[in-house]
Image (spheres, rainbow, N blue to C red):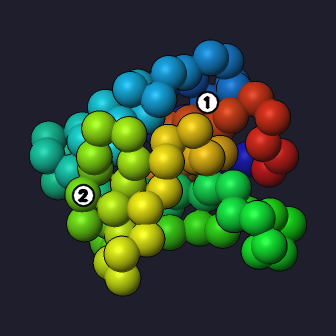
């Protein structure tokens, strides 16, 4: 497992983190740090290998109120987000998501 980024907020240990907190984390990297391109979001995607897929922050068009909007029109609701990594650091890990 990667190191936890102390600037990222949230809980790397998999404790409860609201969907608003995931949104806040992503918005912080989009607007304050301006490093959303360093972020990788792993999310539940039924039918993908292992039912998981990843998207880079550079493919995120909007951090919406209840979903991520991606290039190509894909929308990922926050309840499907399993993990958020910033570089080599895990900023968020859902309790039921494996590494």
Q: Residue 16, percent across and down?
A: 62, 17
Residue 71, compared with residue 93, is above or below; it is: below
Secondary structure type for disc 2: strand
Residue under the point 83% across and 46% down: 98
Q: Residue 87, percent across and down?
A: 47, 58
Q: In this view, does 48 lie to the left or right of 53?
A: right
In the image, farthest residue toward the top: 16
Q: Residue 79, percent across and down?
A: 57, 38
The quadrant where residue 26 appears: top left
* Disc with the residue nearer the chain's start (1 vs 2): 1
Exactly how many numbered labels are in the figure?
2
Query: Which numbered circle lies on residue 62?
Result: 2
Task: Give 31 or 87, whichever is nearer the viewer.
Answer: 31
Secondary structure type for disc 1: loop
Query: Which numbered circle lies on residue 40?
Result: none
Task: Give 44 or 93, whichever is nearer the viewer.
Answer: 44
Q: Residue 94, percent across and down?
A: 68, 34
In the image, farthest residue toward the bottom: 72
The quadrant where residue 97 appears: top right
The quadrant where residue 68 appears: bottom left
Residue under the point 76% across and 29% down: 95
Q: Is residue 87 visible?
A: no
Residue under the point 29% across and 38% down: 65
CA gap between label 1 and label 2 equals 24 Å
Tell us which disc is closer to us: 1 or 2.
Answer: 2
Residue 80, compared with residue 91, is above or below; it is: below
Task: Give 61 or 74, whichever is nearer the viewer.
Answer: 74
Which residue is the site of mark 1?
Answer: 12
Q: Can residue 23 be seen in this view?
A: yes
């Amino acid at each position: 497992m990667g190191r936890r980024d102390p600037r990222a907020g949230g809980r790397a240990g998999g404790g409860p983190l609201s969907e608003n907190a995931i949104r806040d984390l992503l918005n912080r990297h989009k607007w304050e740090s301006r490093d959303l391109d360093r972020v990788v979001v792993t999310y539940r995607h039924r039918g993908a290998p292992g039912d998981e897929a990843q998207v880079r922050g550079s493919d995120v068009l909007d951090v919406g109120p209840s979903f991520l909007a991606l290039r190509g029109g894909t929308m990922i609701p926050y309840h499907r987000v399993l993990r958020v990594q910033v570089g080599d650091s895990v900023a968020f890990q859902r309790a039921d998501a494996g590494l």
